Image (spheres, helix red, strand yellow):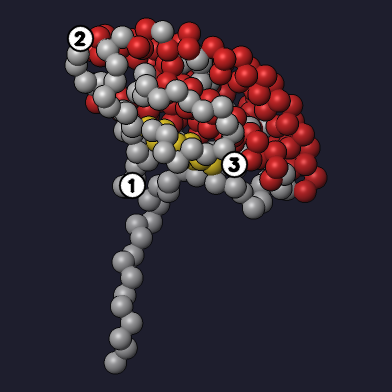
Amino acid sequence: MSDTTPTEPVAAGAPEAYPVTVRAQVDEPLHRWLWLVKWLLALPHLVVLAVLWVAFVVLTIVAGVAIAFTGRYPRGIFDFNLGVMRWSWRVQLYAFTLTTDRYPPFTLTAVPDYPGELDVAYPEQLSRGLVWVKWWLLAIPHYVIIGFFLGGPQVGGGLVAVLALIAGVFLALGRPYPRSILDFIVGMHRWAWRVTAYAALMRDEYPPFRLDMGPDEPTNLE
């Protein structure tokens, strides 16, 4: 008689978690009026990030050439580009999503105790053919959706900006940050960051047309 414990079967066709992790929490208590000037306080970050995103684009092109020949994303470039994305997400949370009053650090590295996290799993192998069509062709349907809700990839405009403004009004009235607004805003940014990672050639998995709302990554995708 076998004492092997049977494993629970996995449902066929069940969606898998996307290899881009985006999380955010409301870092309470939040100041009632600080949100009015956060965009101004974040200007030094925005200036640095403008330069870093130029480097991001250039290095993505370099990585694309490497992938086309070797099928691998150079790890140093991957870590740099991921760092730019992490830095941008922290500034987004502080200055535009308004979910934290903690001033973002000037660093490309992960900050585990910051109330926002972004990570992309490093791929060991990438398609040498997809590198030519990901960002300009295959991702176009996602660009349309992101443009409506965010005003462009990670710009922070569109409907999301309106909802963040409403959250700011709640804070000014001494009310907590509305959970429903948080869920939707983080969900849309989660969608946008998945597309950003895909268009930047960091993953081959096509981003799902799915609004995974909430501060944490979904655990039950069935």
Which dot marks residue 173?
Answer: 2
Q: Earlier in the sequence, mark 3 or mark 1?
A: 3
Picture coordinates of residue 44, whole percent (x, y): 57, 15
Reading the image, the residue beneath label 3 is 203
Residue 67 tag number:
none
- Which quadrant of the figure contains the N terminus? bottom left
* Above or below for 134 versus 221: above
Q: Quadrant of residue 32?
A: top left
Q: Is residue 145 visible?
A: no
> Residue 83's x, y, as percent?
59, 34
Q: Earlier in the sequence, mark 2 or mark 1?
A: 2
Q: Residue at 80% across / 45% down in the picture?
A: 69
Do residues under tags 2 and 3 come within 8 Å of each other at their CB atoms?
A: no
Q: CA distance from mark 2 to mark 1?
A: 34 Å
Identified by mark 1, the residue type is Thr
Binning the other alpha carbons within 10 Å of mark 3 as few (below 14), some (14 to 19) or many (20 upward) gives many
Q: SS for tag 2?
A: loop
Type of the residue with mark 3: Arg
Displayed quadrant of residue 82: top right
Tell me residue 48's x, y (percent): 62, 19
